[in-house]
Image (cartoon, rainbow, N blue to C red):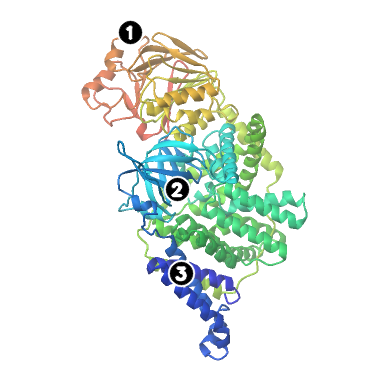
Amino acid sequence: MPSLPLLWLSTAFLAGILLGYWQPLTWQTWGGLAAAAFLVGLFERRLSGRITVYKNWHKVCPVPFGILLAALLAGALRYTLTLPSNSPGDLAYYNDQGEVQVTGLVIDSPDVKATGTTLRLQVKDLAPVATAGGTVQHLPVHGLLLAKMLPGVDWQYGDLIKLQGKLATPANDVEFSYQDYLARQGIYSQMGYPKASLLQHGAGNPIIGALYGLRMQAYQVINQILPQPEAALLNGILLGLDNDLPVSLTKAYQRTGTAHIIAISGFNIAIVAGLFSVFFGKLARRGWAVLLTILAVVLYTLLVGASPSVVRAAIMGSLSLLGQLIGRRQTGLNTLAFVAALMCLGTPTLLWDISFLLTFAATMGLVLFASRFQGGFENLVQRRFSSETSGKLASLVGEYCLFTLAAQLTSLPVTLFNFERLSYTTLLANPLVLPPQPAVMILGGIALLGGLIYLPLGHLLGYLAWPLLAYTNRTVEFFAALPTGGAAMGRISLWAVVIYYAILLGLAFWRPRQPAHRGLKWLAPLSLLGAGLLSAVTWQALVTLPDGRLHLIVIAADDTPVVLVESPDGNRMLINGQRDSRALSSALGRRIPLFAHRLDGLLLTGGSPGALEGLPAVLVRFPAQNAYWNTNMATSTPLDNLQVSLTAQAAPINLLATGQSLDLGGGARLVVLTASTEGMALLVEYGRLSVLLPGGITPEVLGGLDIQPPPQVLLLGASDAALPTTQELVDWSQFQPELVVWQGNPQRNEAGSPAWLNLAEHGWADLTSDGQKIWLQVER
């Protein structure tokens, strides 16, 4: 500590930010005190030889006390300057005062979800909404705005847009303060679903705009060359875009403590920096190679969104490269504190950002304890193995197990304080999923580059990356499903966190450090890796080959039933869609082969327009060769968007009417029983199997049809199967099916009724038939 002046100054500045939060004063007060302390520091050296206090101080800290105090007060000043002044020039001044018009610039990559798109805008001016015959006065204002937009519009970084709506102060909740959460990002105003009009494209920084454009192009390529949810995982690892991950899988990563895999972090930056360093090292001299590598890391940081963890890792990596260039040995703790202070100089509220705190704490654990853990393990195994073998084992176990333990040791208080939960599976899951991640980045990056050059080449190269991505997802899901994966700890006191860190830092500095044991990096034999990848691809291909049976995979949805029909000879038709494209893409990605992720047909029976909103995104990943829907289907904006997507893929649209039939292949066929403005009822036939999809048609109407053969299975959606009364149970039971698969009200198994399978309890069901018998498999 005494030999690290930068550590002292950085720590004082960070502490000053907390002081400014706890003790609110005007910026003039903080500035005056900081200037006075700085002047004291300048003259302190002259007094150090005369005053005993100063002599003793310099034995502990190399930084003059006045300068250190100035750094503390400067931190408080910096925090105070971030607070809104509540003047007419602030955007937040006009919160909750009725409708206004604002003009703003989209300054970040849009957050696109099924329910809408969230934009972060830098507002330039504001005007009250004019009354009839009134004039509009535009007022110059400044501030950030979070706007929730309706789905269906492709907003981009750099768009200059005009919004009309009500500015609102973000809400607070008993469990979570959304207002504080946004305030830490400098956002004090939000607007929900405003009227919007585009004023100008490309009004932002052209370099950042080009990088975001490349990011979205890469995102689309990954979605086309890989199935879901593996494509979503690779998008998170390479591009920092993890919105496509199903909610259940995202929670699995969080529950097992492996969420750092799907977020760009120091681990990813280290791999990227290493690859660029090797590449530029072969093209240029050492100095130029280092500078080009730093430039590449900076561009990659901007490409993936420049989150706090990425910026921290990029700065630390760049400083490390510069240190190597000028021959200076990097001191990890010194650099970490300086990077944290530098980031908080730009955004002081990062000290309340959980992602930043977790990243900082985990990196501190690696700096303080990683080499000690690895050295201790190597000394332990040297009793049984040779020095060379011990070094290899220590490197392998250290990188994928002990380093994770070191990071978790220092990040544990942050986790417990914020989430109040301790995960037992973290120590088990991380050593199993971390080793393949460098190969995931390298192989996934190669597949992406191949896809950007020539899409079929990306498909081919994607076969190499898919097994490792699938392995990662399946392993995380396995550990997340364990019944004893964690325990609720309750509220943790802030003083307990402080005492924990005091003891931890005391152990780190008071105990002698052991020399770092570098060892050899773990390298898996190429032949074994190649055989494993080939086996995984072959296995996935075999399990998804046609098995000569008809499969109807019924997927839980909010409205009409969503069914993937697989004919005995391998044709695949998707019936209906759902609002959540992530969940549907994930369900299809697990069933459709890696080497042929496409649909032979898309069929819509009707239902609410909301069920169509997710289909355009699904069709990007699984293009449809043909589309079919009810000739009486009502027009809507989601349907228009879907038609645009199908036209872009050159997929013909066919309108179906009552009595028409489709050959599904392999002896299976689909018959349109009736088509009206209410919906379209379908009958799937294969041998003795007959499956009825009401498609919005009531049991009274269907009961008047002569359905031959009588349906053995009914597939009901939520709208078909509300079933609030016993009478409606009887209405559906008139068809005398052997099984009803549905999602709705829990009434079922009434006297005389068939077996009822509620998808709300499972997620999906696979009905399989050889034309004579029926097999049922459900998600447990």
Judge whether residue 122 can be spotted in this image: yes
Answer with mark 1 or mark 3, whichever residue precedes in sequence: 3
Tell me, for residue 169, which label it has, or none.
Answer: none
Closer mark to the observer between disc 3 and disc 2: 2
Above or below: residue 302 compared with residue 196: below
Pointers 1 and 3 in contact (C-beta within 8 Å)? no
Residue at x-position 72% and y-position 62%: 325
Answer with mark 1 or mark 2, whichever residue precedes in sequence: 2
**Quadrant position of residue 776:** top left
Rendering coords of residue 474 (x, y %): 52, 41
* Real-space Cα separation, disc 1 to disc 3, in angstroms: 80 Å
Tag 3 secondary structure: helix
Task: Work out which quarter of the rendered image holds the N terminus and state it.
Answer: bottom right
Rendering coords of residue 590 (x, y %): 51, 32
Tag 1 secondary structure: loop
Rendering coords of residue 144 (x, y %): 43, 50
Amino acid residing under circle 2:
Lys
Tag 2 secondary structure: strand
Amino acid residing under circle 3:
Gly
Residue at x-position 39% and y-position 24%: 636
**Residue marked by disc 2:** 124
Q: Residues within 10 Å of mark 2 (few under 14, many from 20)?
A: some
**Residue marked by disc 1:** 706
**Residue marked by disc 3:** 16
Amino acid residing under circle 1:
Asp
